[in-house]
Amino acid sequence: MKHSRVNVIRVFRSPLDHWRGRLEAGNLVIPCALGRSGTRHSKREGDGASPVGRFKILQAFYRADHGPRPRTGLPLKAIRPGDGWSDDVRDRRYNRLVPLPCPTGHEKMWRDDHLYDVVLDIAWNRRPIVRGRGSAIFLHLARPGFLPTEGCVAVEPRMIRRLLERIGPNTQIEIIG
């Protein structure tokens, strides 16, 4: 079945649990996990909060060895074992994809825990990039039990492909505090 693209994906924090919420993409409503510190307007590196605001979704990444190429209107890139993401405020490449090995602080994009089997790059702190304002804010796969993230939005693996079908190059994500 073909789904129409949505202009805005909205993420609402649960009033009962600050690191859980729901994501709405048109008529698709799914539970999600948020940062361990809930949501914040003034996000900082390492604070564990998901940033409040409306952001463009820049691109999607996926593990080609963990499933078929997702259908989406976003630019799509396969993750390789040598991909990382700089989270070191001293690195001139802060909050960007970096090649590994990397001598500064970073996250590995090629993960054993499957959280990044599909990743959407949320344009938090991207234009301009301000060091210390937070990095690697993604929409990715949730841990079992919807445990909190480090500041991202996470959905269950079986729902990510349904969500991707609804996302186009102009879709934005709005995280509501």
Image (spheres, rainbow, N blue to C red):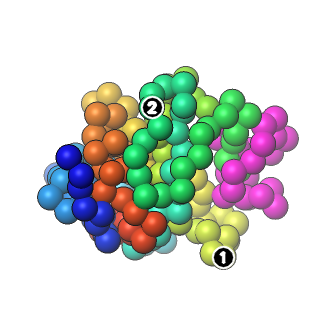
Q: Quadrant of the C terminus?
A: bottom left
Left or right of 129, for residue 138: left
Vertical arrangement, residue 2 with respect to residue 147, above or below: below
> Helix or strand or loop: what does disc 2 sit on?
loop
Q: Residue under circle 1?
A: 128
Residue 164 numbered tag: none
The residue positioned 69% from the left and 30% from the top of the image is 81
Q: Quadrant of residue 105?
A: top right
Q: Quadrant of residue 176?
A: bottom left
Q: Residue under circle 2?
A: 68
x%, y% of residue 121?
A: 52, 55
x%, y% of residue 8?
A: 31, 69
The residue positioned 59% from the left and 46% from the top of the image is 77
Are the residues flagged by discs 2 and 1 in contact, CB closer than 8 Å? no
Q: Is residue 104 magenta?
A: yes
Write down the region rendered in magenta.
87-109
Left or right of 105, for residue 65: left
- Which secondary structure class fits the magenta region best? loop
Viewer-proximal residue among 45 and 158 = 158
Vertical arrangement, residue 161 with respect to residue 35, above or below: above
Q: Amino acid at mark 1?
A: Pro
Q: CA distance from mark 2 to mark 1?
A: 34 Å
x%, y% of residue 42?
A: 48, 71
The residue positioned 47% from the left and 37% from the top of the image is 69
Specify whether residue 151 is in view. Answer: no
The residue positioned 28% from the left and 66% from the top of the image is 6
Of marks 2 and 1, which one's residue comes earlier in the chain?
2
> Helix or strand or loop: what does disc 1 sit on?
loop
Query: Residue most toward the right?
Result: 103
Mark 1 residue crowding within 10 angstroms, few (<14) / some (14–19) / many (20+) = few
Query: Residue most toward the front?
Result: 1
Left or right of 124, for residue 10: left
